[in-house]
Image (cartoon, rainbow, N blue to C red):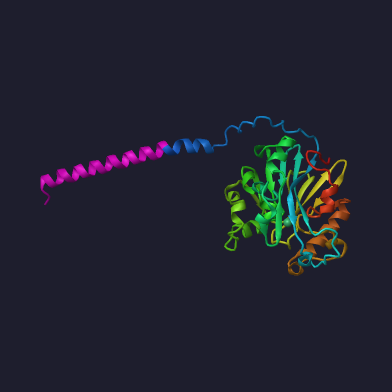
Amino acid sequence: MTSPALSARAAGIHGALLNALLLALALTCATQRPAVAEEAPSRPAARPAGVAPLPKVTAPRLYVIDCGTLVYNRPEDYSLTREEVADTNMSVPCFLVLHPKGVLLFDTGLSDRLVGRPLWENVDGGYGQIKFTTLSGQLADIGVTAADITYLAISHSHFDHVGNANDYAGSTWLAQKAELDVMFGAKADPAYLPLYSALAHARKQVFEGDHDVFGDGTVVLKFTPGHTPGHQALYVKLARTGGVVLAGDLYHYAEERTLHRMPKEEQAAGTPASRELIDRFLTQKHAQLWIGHSTAFFKNAIKAPGWYD
Ligand SMILES: [Zn+2]
């Protein structure tokens, strides 16, 4: 049996608890409601002041963007001697494709945060990193903001290709499944994960093999595993320039191609088959191969805000 006094006290405690719970619930609802509204894909963000309008195109247009330089002096890692290589340093380009149906950013280069920092401060695995200009600034010079970029794709997830990936996590990430698994799997390298961690929450199209980006065959991601499990090159069919394959890291030095060399660890990792596949593809499409890390390629390329069409 319960005494009335005890019951009244218990009811009082229950009442207080209930009030506290209701208050907590009200506060939770009050704080959550605006956050949900912010996440809704309603209005596009206002265009930053001073950025030119996005160029309108009727056919694909390709931009080569300066995303830094790697100062390096160990071509032996690519089975080449210093005497065999004209320049042991590597350019680091990013590429932008404007297509009538949208915009694709292919690779994001070295981090924009390195601009102005001394070479010796950012040496990674023997690669000194130099940046003179930001990716975001060069995109703005073209008339492109991060919000304009429909799709982000990376050739692979090494640091010199994902340095600014987080800045473009608002785009739809075109992810090769094998690379996604490496990037966010149990063996993901905690040293590099912060460079692209925001992609975990990006909208994604995940696929295995080649991927036709705009559905008309003019911009196609080519699955070329070997350098990494989900490495991909990019084919762009241009009206005046013709077909171009952006090699990613299928090759680093142009001499790897002419002298048939590759890093030892890639010989049994898929690179020979991927190189053969791309060679056949180049012949079939009468396309040229652009090796982004080759300083000879980069020196001679038309750089953004100029373009290829
Ligand atoms: Zn690379």
Along the viewing direction, whichever of 172 and 55 lies nearer the viewer: 55
* Left or right: 272 in relation to 39: right
Q: Where is residue 162 shown, x and y percent of the image?
A: 67, 52
Q: Which residue: 57% across, 48% down?
A: 201
Along the viewing direction, whichever of 194 and 231 lies nearer the viewer: 194
Is residue 24 inside the magenta stretch? yes
Is residue 180 inside the magenta stretch? no
- Ligand 1 occupies quarter: bottom right
Q: Where is residue 118 shown, x and y percent of the image?
A: 68, 51
Q: Is residue 211 visible?
A: no
Q: How many marks?
A: 0
* Left or right: 300 in relation to 132: right
70 vs 239: above or below: below
Q: Which residue: 44% across, 39% down?
A: 32
Q: Is residue 245 visible?
A: yes
* Left or right: 303 in relation to 185: right
Q: Which residue: 72% across, 40% down?
A: 138
Q: Where is residue 35 shown, x and y percent of the image?
A: 48, 38
156 vs 18: above or below: below
Quadrant of the frame with the C terminus: top right
Q: Which residues are magenta?
A: 1-30
Q: Which residue: 58% across, 49% down?
A: 198
| Chief SS of the magenta region | helix
Along the viewing direction, whichever of 153 and 117 lies nearer the viewer: 117
